[in-house]
Image (cartoon, helix red, strand yellow):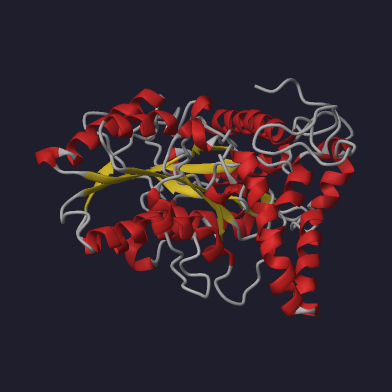
Amino acid sequence: MASDPAPDDAAAAENGHGNDNGHGNGNGNGNGNGPSPKRARSVISADEIRTEFAHHDAAVARVNNGSFGCCPASVLAAQAHWQGLFLAQPDAFYFHGLQQGLLRSRAAVAEAVGAGDVSEVSLVDNATTAAAIVLQHAAWSFAEGRFASGDAVLMLHYAYGAVKKSIHAYVARAGATVVEVPLPFPVASADAIIAEFRAALAVAKEGGRRVRLAVIDHITSMPSVVIPVKELVAICREEGVDKVFVDAAHSIGQVPVDVRDIGADFYTSNLHKWFFCPPAVAFLHTRKDPIASQLHHPVVSHEYGNGLPMESGWIGTRDYSAQLVVSEAIDFVNRFEGGIEGIRSRNHEKVIEMGMMLAEAWGTFLGTPPELCGSMVMVGMPGCLGVESDDDALRVRTMLRKDFQVEVPIYYNSRRVEGQEMAKDRNGDPVTGYVRISHQVYNVTKDYERLRDAVNKLVSEGFTSINLRPSEKQEA
């Protein structure tokens, strides 16, 4: 873990004391998922942190960095510069600026994630686009007879919803047997995840069936759990799985990422969630392999057949500016003590601290041990709130936004483990609802205290989720 954070930060100036968000002055420079800065700069101050995120709605306790990320003003200014160049002289931008700028960003990503060569890195809009690229190739392999009908594709039960739908839209439709890994939640250890993965892989291989692709999350979205991805990739290699795609939408900026060490065939992560790029930009790393030349962007344009990095670098007239400011985002993170590694460590420490504070106040618990958390953590809500469906969770989330100005996702845990009781709060009520809290450099303790107090107020007033249901459902 990181050493004790320095005393100057965004909250210190606000509160007049203390290190509230865990980020402040120091003498470190960037390391871990980010090259060293090209020029010496003083470490970011408390006032500068607040200025960089002054465009955030100050009325809202924003503890949901995980959904859409954040982008500092200095990086937004760099993006606006690129947008201005295009609007001023689009032909010059297209012929003389775009590809050089994209190559600069790809090189920065390659260095940040330990890629062997810049040719292994493509820039796309988001991890969902990267998934479409990989799954499209798998679908073609079924359609063209390289894979047999009934061959298996393995995915986690908690795979991101859009990716699960893409798996069914592309490969199940093409003839694949889709096998899910039924992960436990709350989860006690990485060993429990590994055991479930091995068992599901055995099911996928029954009857001599070939497993053509495993889709593994690095950090699941809802519920948020850091998956032992390196170990699962190694298991896939041992068991003869053809290819492994790691959907790491949340990973870069939350956990260390070394694509060669992880060893997957395909690895994607969003740069706009935890790496301070504007929306929307992600990278797709493809390990050197003959299959790389067979991958194509699902939007076909003039660069078709010139390799995925080039195909992704021009999919028609659109705004490419988010893909052109990766180096500026790296400059931003390197203004913090320890660079991105320091940010990650302090965010982890603070989100665990805030999660424990909420759990103590609500009489509940964390959904995962700290070692399976990055900068997000699941915290059980009081069982008396009666969250009994995804619709209940969404309605409570909306109420927190509108009535309390608190933005936080809520997860309904519908999983019932056979032979195991649902975890209960200190009053003996089953815990079915969980908040997923995030911590990023702009957050301060009072953000989480507002969430704590909002939920406590609901409990004290006898609120239950049934109060928000349509009248016909209440009567039923």
* Residue 146 appears in the figure: yes
Horizontal arrangement in the rendering, residue 227 relative to residue 97 (left or right) = left
For residue 403, which quarter of the picture?
bottom right
**Tally of numbered discs:** 0
> In the depicted view, which residue is nearer to us: 241 or 145?
145
> In the depicted view, which residue is nearer to us: 476 or 21?
21
> In the depicted view, which residue is nearer to us: 301 or 282?
301
Kindly give the residue lying farthest to the left in the view shown: 207
| Residue 344 rendering spot, x and y as whole percentages | 65, 34
The residue positioned 40% from the left and 66% from the top of the image is 470
Horizontal arrangement in the rendering, residue 4 relative to residue 260 (left or right) = right
The residue positioned 38% from the left and 51% from the top of the image is 291
* Residue 168 appears in the figure: no
For residue 43, which quarter of the picture?
top right
Looking at the rendered image, the quarter that the N terminus falls into is top right
Looking at the rendered image, the quarter that the C terminus falls into is bottom left
Horizontal arrangement in the rendering, residue 357 relative to residue 9 (left or right) = left
| Residue 66 rendering spot, x and y as whole percentages | 58, 48
> In the depicted view, which residue is nearer to us: 373 or 398?
373
* In the depicted structure, whether residue 75 falls above or below residue 228: below
* In the depicted structure, whether residue 231 falls above or below residue 267: above
The residue positioned 61% from the left and 46% from the top of the image is 454
| Residue 109 rendering spot, x and y as whole percentages | 63, 46
Horizontal arrangement in the rendering, residue 208 relative to residue 52 (left or right) = left
The residue positioned 70% from the left and 61% from the top of the image is 100
| Residue 201 rendering spot, x and y as whole percentages | 24, 36
